[in-house]
Amino acid sequence: MYERTRVHLDEEFGVGTAAELRRVRTAILRQEPGACGPTAAPRPGLPDSAGTGPGAAVNAAARPDGGEAAGRTEPHPPVRAAQEPQLPAENEASGRSDGRAATPVRPLTATAADRKEGLQDVAGSAARQGGGAATTDGAVATRTTAGPDHVHRTAPTAADSPPAAPASPTSAADAPAPENRTSPETPGAVPDGPRTQSPFTGRNEELERLTAAAKCAVAGHGHVAGVLGPAGVGKTRLLLELVPRLEAAGAAQAGTDPDRADLEVIWSHCFLGEGVPPYWLWTQILRRLSTTRPDAFREAAKPFGALLAPLMPERAARPGGPAPESDWGQARFLTHDAVCEVLLALATQRPLVLLLEDLHWADTASLDLLRLLSTRSRGHPLGIVLTAREYEVESDATLRRMLSEVLRGPRTETLRLGGLSRHAVAALVVAQAGPGVDAEVVEVLHRRSEGNPYFVMQLLSLLGDARSLRRPDAVDVLLTRVPTGVREALHQRFAALPDTVLCVLRLCAVIGTEIDTDLLDLTAIDSEPVTEALESAIRAGLLGEDPHHPERLHFTHALVQETLIDELTREDRQRLHARVAEGISTRRLGRVADEEIERVAHHAWHAKSAMPTAETLPLLLRAAEQAEQQLAYEQVETWLRRAVHLVGLLPPGDPSAASLDQRLHIQLGQVLATTRGYGHAEAETALARGRALNSVTRSPEDPSVLWALCASDLVTGRYDTSRRYSGLLRELADRDGQPVAVLGAAYGEGIVLHVRGQLRQSLAELEHGVAMADGYALEGHSLARTFQHDPRVSCRSYNTFTHWLLGDRETATARRRELLRLTEDDSRPSDRSFALYVDAVVAAWEGDAETARSSGAEGVRVADEHGLIYWKAMLGMLEGWGLTCSGQEDGLALMHSCLAELRNSRTHLRRPLHLGLLGQAQHRAGRTEDAKTTFHALLAVITRRGERVYLHPELPATRLLHDLLGRGAAESVAAG
């Protein structure tokens, strides 16, 4: 509560209250009278936030070893007890008595994750039990005679909410609330989200194992279980689910055996920060038992007198009492033994289960006591369940040794929690946002969080309202930002590392998610100790090893890498990218392997001004070429855009700038035409600029550019303009016989004649195109790149349509089969999409709804996989038509969305065909008036652009149009 309050006041109101709150918190922890009241000045005899006083003496008396492990030192030098021998000066200075060097003290300010896992307030701990009573010492018993009405409950959060009943789990993990705080009336929800509670999911197996272990303990066998995992992974939530199960089992056992009392569950927590007394973990438990079982506790503790004083200062020896033990080591053991005897005696009367949280913050003395109790509890009805963060355990030698001793006995269980499965994350999403969230959003959440429930909730907080997961930009938001709470949690982990280790980690982050240690050695400078840094990062749980590839490491979480990169200045980030690019280029004697082309281009681009433009450009062009070979068109576009940008940065007068600029604009225009359609304005602009630069570079006309501009006019319905380009192509074909010019002239003219309804003339051009395309293929010409399609596919497409409309169904069917066969294996995705489109259109004309749907759906899949937006919309029209004709209502919605997409890309080619299909589908769905409206729109388009072929009497849409609007409406348009 201390940290939560301090951070809230600081962030929300700008009030700096650290010193005063720290003093109050320290006083509360030490049970000082009047700690909760205001103080005008320090009271005599009591310490302030930096001084010493009687309170410090209590600490010393409770801490005969004179020191603790890293992060557990006192805020001021403790006053030694009378029985404590003088310790060596070097150990006193380090706060340790065992001769080990002290590691750096962890920072006081806890992260958001710590505020849940370590700095929970006392009342909040009680509130989690759903009916448990809180005591002033902070421990909680889940079955007590005290009522809960007096307990001050904290506002529940999405990551830590009290269950309303044992059967209603409410939280996602043992993690704090997202940065956007939830209100008391909406537990477990992102603000303004559905008022539901997060389900307990993905941990059933672990819960069963933990339940069995605890039941074994309370049956009289004794048992210790450890739950280990990173912050926010769900350790506390697992214990919250365990408690009601144990209560139910205890009540059932008491019901069948009246002589046996039901069990008692007690929570206790370790805390991070200043002023926490030694043994506080056990002080909470003893004080709780003295409250819930006062008579039994008094009787059990009576034989041990002042031996319990280090844990319960109120039991310190009175003046004139027996002298304390002079051997501090023996005194410590006797104290530990006394605590064990008291707990075992009380467990014999009524079974006990101790839930010990956040053992990574435990002091050494508390761990030593735990080690003894874990051994002594065997054969007694006492169970212990502890939680700890595994990476902190592994990074602290003392903590690692002690916990391994506690958890390696015959009746022990160790659970290591990893991330939730994708299915479990999906359940959290449904609980927060309701059903209907896109699967891609869930996948991104799972991948970004790696199943860590706290990270899931923090990522949800980026959108404010969980229902915003349905926003179109939800994936972009989740991918591009690191939540504040996650950043805080990671910064605390970074703060415990030396600067040299952080320097190497930042270099690793720039290298990438997977770190090649050979490349790291090449890239690191002398002041960056790679081996030592990697070992430290692995121990800290920030890097992981690949068992199959010893030379590779990886970040344990993608957000670790992103946070490290975000900490770098722009200049430092660019400098590191340049070092990595240079390292990749030089480690193979200046030759970049094929598998590293894109990688080195990535680093060269992000190096910006830290690397000369003349060196970066060739790397980007190689990456674009490789991406095109891999049919990764979206990547081609990215690399070309970046290259275009860099060309503008070349020095004035560079002789290669103009030709390079021309080449890049042509390539970019062709790629955009492939992915977004020839009608896309940017594709046409890039192509036109490339052609215009002919006057600067003194280059001849490029037939591939002329064909692309011709196709752009065709797709946008500018048929007359397109004939100007097809005419230029025919001139080039007649003069030089260039294949692209020959095919472009025939195909372009054939399309115009087709849409004008001059089918015989069109067929002549298209048949010529098919014959020439087949001939060029036999001669070994590869024209798909310059023609943007395999010309055998392009020319057969309209050839198929024309044969069908002329009544030659046999040839049309043969052409359909040829198209599917040509594109079946190893074809360009755009060619396969085109072939499936032709197949689906003819199937629709023939009333074959299933083939239209299946070919359309397959084409949509292919286009979607390769980023072909144009073809995805084209084929979606046919899939939607097939769905509607099969009785599925969502088909019409798909058709409307595809029409809108095509309109946005300025695609008018075959628009009357698509409107005819829509009108048919609407009529089939019983929407006659909508169909009439659509057919009126079809007639308007045909009138405007003269596409009379789409009123051909063989078309089913034409016959339906006659039925709905009358034959005269269509005939007047056709005649015009």
Image (cartoon, rainbow, N blue to C red):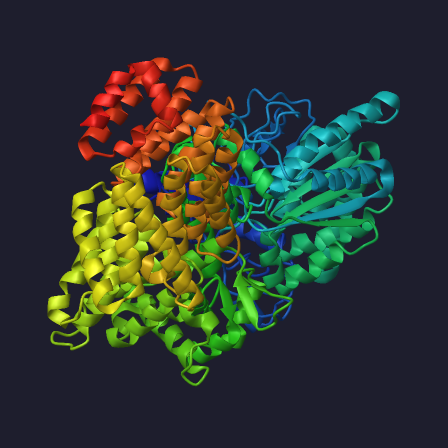
Specify the farthest residue to the bottom: 589
23 or 790: nearer the eye?
A: 790
Q: 721 above or below 939?
A: below
- Is residue 641 at all visible to an observer of this figure? no
What percent of the width, then of the height, locates residue 351? 80, 34
232 or 685: nearer the eye?
A: 685
What percent of the width, then of the height, locates residue 109? 44, 50
How many marks on residues? 0
Residue at the image point whose x is 44% and y is 56% from the top: 828
Q: 592 above or below 44?
A: below
Instruction: Tell me the quadrant of the picture where the C terminus can be found.
Output: top left
Q: 441 above or below 917?
A: below
561 or 502: nearer the eye?
A: 561
Q: Quadrant of residue 60?
A: bottom right
Q: Is residue 946 left or right of residue 136?
A: left
Q: Is residue 719 left or right of residue 367?
A: left
- Is residue 337 at all visible to an observer of this figure? yes
585 or 121: nearer the eye?
A: 585
Q: Quadrant of residue 290?
A: top right
Residue at the image point whose x is 66% and y is 26% from the top: 166
Q: Is residue 974 left or right of residue 423?
A: left
Q: Is residue 758 left or right of residue 346?
A: left
Residue at the image point whose x is 30% and y is 61% from the top: 740
What percent of the width, then of the height, locates residue 556? 54, 58
What percent of the width, then of the height, locates residue 188? 51, 30
